[in-house]
Image (spheres, rainbow, N blue to C red):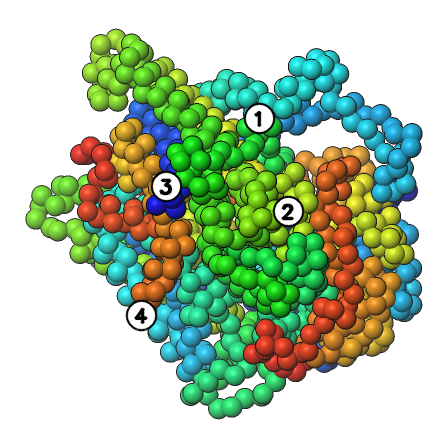
Amino acid sequence: MDAILLQVLNGIDKGSAYALIALGLTLIFGTLGVVNFAHGALFMIGAFVAVTVGKILDISKVTLDPVRVDFLGNPAKIKTPYVTEWFGEFGFWMIEWSVLVSVIVAIPVMVLIGIILERGLIKHFYDRPHADQILVTFGLAIVLQEVIKAVFGANPIPQSAPELLKGSLDFGVMIGMAENTVIYPLWRLVYFCFSDLIIGGVFAFLRFTTFGMVVRAGMADRETVGLLGINIDKRFTIMFGVAAAVAGLAGVMYTPINPPNYHMGMDFLVLSFVVVVVGGMGSLPGAVAAGFLLGILESFASMPLIKDAIAAIGLPSIDQIIIYLVAVIVLLVRPRGLMGKAGMMED
Amino acid sequence: MNLMKDRLLLIIFACVVLAAPLIFAPTGAAYPDLLQRFAIYGIFAIGFNILFGLTGYLSFGHAAFLGVGSYSAVWMFKLLSMNIVPALLLSIVIAGVFSLLIGYISLRRSGIYFSILTLALAQMCYNLAYSVLTPLTNGETGLQLRLDDPRILDAAGDAGSLPSTNFFGLEMKEVFWNPTIFGYDLQFNWGYYVCALLLILSFWISIRIFRSPFGLILRAVKTNQTRLNYTGINSRPYTLAAFVISGMFAGLAGGLLATMDPLAGAERMQWTVGGEVVLMVVLGGMGTLSGPVLGAVFIKYFENIFSKINDGVLHGWFAIMPEWIENAMVLIVSPFVGKGWHLTLGALFMIVVIFLPGGLVEGAQKIGAKLSGANKRAAKVGIE
Amino acid sequence: MSKLIMNRRGLLKTGAAVGAGMAMPTILTAASHAGYTNAPTGSTVTLGFNVPQTGAYADEGADELRAYELAVKHLNGQGDGGMMNTFSSKELKGNGILGKEVAFVTGDTQTKSDAARASAQSMIQKDGAVMITGGSSSGVAIAVQGLCQEAGVIFMAGLTHSNDTTGKDKKANGFRHFFNGYMSAAALAPVLAEMYGEDRNAYHLTADYTWGWTQQESIQAATEAKGWNTVANVLTPLTTTDFSSYVAPVLNSGADILVLNHYGGNMINSLTSAVQFGLRDKMVNGKNFEIVVPLYSRLMARGAGENVKGIFGSTNWHWSLQDEGSKAFVQSFGQEYGFPPSQAAHTVYCQTLLYADACERAGTHNPCGVAEALEGFKFSGLGNGDVEYRAEDHQCFKDVLVVKGKENPTSEFDLLEVVQVTPRAQVEYPADHPMFAGGALGSCNAGG
C-alpha cells in the first residue's frame, strides 16, 4: 500500500514535468499548426537561463589570500560575489533563492526568444508541409543545443534549491503511517504545485480573457477570425512566446531536480512528443492528462515488485520501454490519442 | 527518351562510384574505411528515399533495421562462415521481417502519428538491444567475433587471430592495388568494390521503382492519399511494400557495415541514427535519385573528416598569415570544426531546409542552370 | 608568457603537420617492407588520440586531449618534462620516440562504438597512426581495442573501468593503465566496513549494461565478504534521467546503505535524487543511512555539486597526492592550463609516456616488440607507487585511492579528498579470477 502511494506521488511529480512540456508543445501546435521539434531545446534553454543567472550572481571580486596557497603554490584567491558586496543581506538572499530570480528573469527572456523564433523562422513554415516543419525545427534544436554546449560545456552544471526547500517531507507520518515509509523531497512538491499553477494559469488565460477567446476561435477557424478583421497572426506570435515561456519555466524549475546539461532537451523531446500524441494532437487537456498518466505508469513500471513479477514470467524488464509501449497501444486502440480531434495532422 | 536519360544517369553514377578512390583523393577521404561508409550509407539513404521521398511518410525508426541487419550478419559470421554472402542474405531477410512487423503496425496511422510510432518502436528496439537482450547483442560493447566461435562451414584458421570477412576467398579488407597517381597514394580494396557494386545495383533498383507504376502510386500517396483512395486503390499495401523495401535496404546496409567491420553495436539502432538518414536524404534532395547518395557522402565526410580538424590543423592552415590574424582566424573557425562539427552540420541542414527544399541536388541544378544559361527544363534533365 | 605561447604554437604545428593531411596526400599503410602496419618512414611518428568530443563525455575527452598534448610536448623536449623526470625508466630523452618527432591526430569517438571504430580506422588507414589511445567508456574501449588488434597497432586504453577490458575481452595489442571494477570494490570494501560497520544492509541501483553489471558484481562480492547483506539489486535503464522512482522505495526496504553503480550523467542524477530524498539525514536500523558511489571522477563530482559531500568512492589517481610524480605532473599541467588535471588526464598521460618508453626499450615501433616490452614491465614515479603491467592480461596493478566528497571545497576542482591509498597487494587478483574469465589474449598482431 505504502509502496503504491509512494509511486503515485512520484508519478504525478514526474508527470507534472511531462505535462508542462506537452502543454507548451500543444499550444504551438494547436494555434499555429506547427510541429515544433525544437520545443525540448526551449526547455533546455530555460534551464540554462537559470544557470546563467546563477553564474551572474556569482561574479566575484577576487582578492588574494595572504596565508593560503593554491595547488601551484600561488596565493589562493578569495572570491566575494559583487551582489553581496553591493546589496549585503539582499545579495545573499538572491544567491540563496537564485531559482526564484531565474523564474523572474526567464519569463521575459523566453517570451522574447519565442517571438524572435516565430517571426524569424517558424512564420515562413506555416504553408510548408509538416515534414518540413519537423525538419527545420529538428535542425534548430541541434543548433541551439550545440551553441549551449560550446558556451557551457558538456558536463552538467548543478543548481541548488534554496536551503529552506532542500529537505524531504515525511508524508507517511502525516497520514498516520510509520516513519520513513512515504517520504518525498520538498522541491519536487514545489515543482508539482508550480506546474499546476502554470497549467491552471494557461487554461484560465485561454478560457476567461478576451485574448484567449480570440485565440481559441483562431484555433478552431483561423480564416473566419481573420475575416472578422482581427489580426490573428499577432496573437499567434504572442502565443508562441507564451508557449516558449511555459517550456522555459519548466526548465528553470527543473534545474534543482537534475543538474542541467546541453542535451536534456533531446532527452525530453522524444518523451514529450509521445505524451502529446498519446493525449491527442492539439488537445490541451489531453496533453496534461497524458503527461500525468505516463508519469504514473513509468513510476509503477520501475517498482521492484513489478520488475520482479515481470522477470518471473520471463519477459524483459518493462521500465525500459513502458512509455513507448503505451504510446503504441494507445495509438492502435484509439488512433487519435486519448482526447484528439478528428482531422488533426492526418495528412 | 526518359529511358535513355536514366541509362545515361546510371552509367555516369557507376563511373563515379567505381572511380571514387581516385576522385576523392584530393579531399582526403579516399581511404577504404570512409569510402565504404559512403557507399553503405548511400545504400541506406537510397532505400529510405523510396519510402520518404516517394510517399512522404517520415520514419524516424529506420535505424532499427540497420541495427538488426548488422546483428544478423555478425551472428552469421560467428556461427556459419566468414563468407559475406550468407551474412548479407540473412541481414536482408531479417530486416525485411522486422520492417514488415513495424511497418504493419505504424502504417495504420499517417502523418506525425506515423513518425512517432516508428520512433517509439525503434527506441524500444534500441533499449532492449542495449541492455536486456545482451545475450543476443552483447549490449554496450557490441556483438563481436571471438576466437572460439564455431563457424561450422569454415576451415580452422590461425588460432591466435580472428579470421577476416571474405567474398569466396577475397578478403574484404585486403588492398589489392596500391598505386601512386598524380602524387596521391591510392588504396583500392575489395571491401569497397563489393559495397560499390551493391550501391550501383541499389541505384538501379531505385531508378526502376521510380519509373514503375508502383512508383507512380507511391507518388500519388504523397500528393493526395484521399483522392487515391477514392479512385478505388487501397494505398496501404503499396506503402507497406515501400516500407519493407526500404527496411531491406537498411538491412543490407547494416549487413555491409558488419562485413567491413564485424562489430554490431546497439547505438546503430538509436533514433538519432534514424534522424541521420533523414538528414542525408533531405540534405541531398528528397525524391531525387542521386540526392540521397550525395547527402550520405556529405554527412559521413563531416563526421569523419571535419571532426578531425583540431586547433593544430587550423594553425597549420593559417600559418602563412601574420600571427595575430592566424590566431584570430583560428578563434573564429574553431567552434565550427573539430568538436563543433555537429553545430556546422545542424546549421547547414537548416539552411538547406529553409532555402533549398530540393536539397543539394536542387542547388546544383540552379547553379547549373545559371551557368549554362539554358532554360530550367534542360537543367532538370538527368536528375529527376 | 610569450615563451609559453611559442611553445604551444610549436607543438600545435607538429600536430598540424600530420593533421593537415586532410587536404594533402599522406604516405601510409601497407608499409609492408617494415613488416608492420604504419611503420613510420619519415622523421615523425604519428599517434592517434581518439576521445569523445561530442556527447555527454565531451568535457572528459577535452581533458584527456589536454594531457595528450602535454605528453607530446614533453616527449618532443618542450616544456618542463613533467613526469618524464620522475619516471623510473630513463630511456626517454625528450627527442621524440626513437629519435622521431611525435606528431598526433585527433578524432571524435562520440562515445559510440561505431563512431569510435570509424575514427580509429581513419587514423590507421589515412593518417598512418602507429598507436591509438583514448576513450571514456568501456564499450568504446573494448570496441576500439578489437579493431587495433585486427589492424595490427597498439591500443593504450584511456578511461575504461569495466572488468571486461582486461577480462573476457582482453586483446594482445591492448593495454590498460586505468583500474577496474574489481579493484574499486577490493579497495572500497574494507574502508566501508571500517567506517560504517560490518552489519550493514546494502541496496544496489545498477546501470543496466555491461559495466554496471560487472561493477555491481564486484562490489557485492567484496562487501558481502566483509559481512554486509545485500537487500536488493535494482537495474535502471541507461536512458533514465529521473531516478526518483528508483530511489523512493529504498528507505522502506530495510536497507541502510545505498550503492549507486552508475557512471557519468546517470550517477550525477541518481545521487542528486538520493540526496533530495533526504536519505542521508535518516536513521535506519539504528544507523545513519549512507550512500556509496564505487567509481568517482572529478567531472561527475562537479556535476553533482554539493551532493557529493562525505560520500565514499574510489579513483585511479587524484591531483592532491604528494608523491614526486604526481607533484611534477600537477605542476606541469597546471602551468599549462591553469587548473589541476583530472584522473582521466593522468591515465592518458601515463599511457603515452609508457608507450613511448616501451618503444625506446624495444628499439622499434613494431607493435609486437612494444607489447613485449610492456608485458611484465615494472615501473614507478608516475604517481601510483610501484606499478606492474601484468603480462597475462595487460592490466596495470597499482595502488587504488579511496576518496570522499570534500566537506569544504576551496575551489571547483577541489571536490574530493583522499581517505586512503589502498596498497596494490590488497587489490590484486589472479589472472584466472572468475570475474575475468572467458577470454584469451590471442597472439600479438603486427599487421603489415
Side (left or right) of A144 relative to C51: left
Q: Nearer the viewer, mark 4 or mark 3?
A: 3
Label 1 – label 3 distance at C-alpha: 25 Å
Please name the residue that numbered disc 2 is placed on.
Answer: C300
Q: Are marks 4 and 3 in contact (CB under 8 Å)?
A: no
Query: Which residue position is annotated with label 4?
Result: B93
The residue labelled by disc 1 is: A164
Q: CA distance from mark 4 to mark 3?
A: 48 Å
User: Given this view, does label 4 or label 1 mark the residue nearer the observer?
Assistant: 1
Badge 3 marks a residue whose secondary structure is helix
Tell me which chain the residue with mark 2 is part of. C
Q: Is residue C153 above or below residue B213?
A: below
Image marks 4 and 1: residues in contact by CB distance under 8 Å: no
Q: Counting other residues with Cα less than 10 Å from the Cα at mark 1, is it few (<14), some (14-19), or many (20 or more)?
A: few
Density class for disc 2 (Cα within 10 Å; few <14, some 14-19, many ≥20) is: many
Is residue A331 positioned above or below A344 on the image?
Answer: below
Q: Are marks 3 and 2 in contact (CB under 8 Å)?
A: no
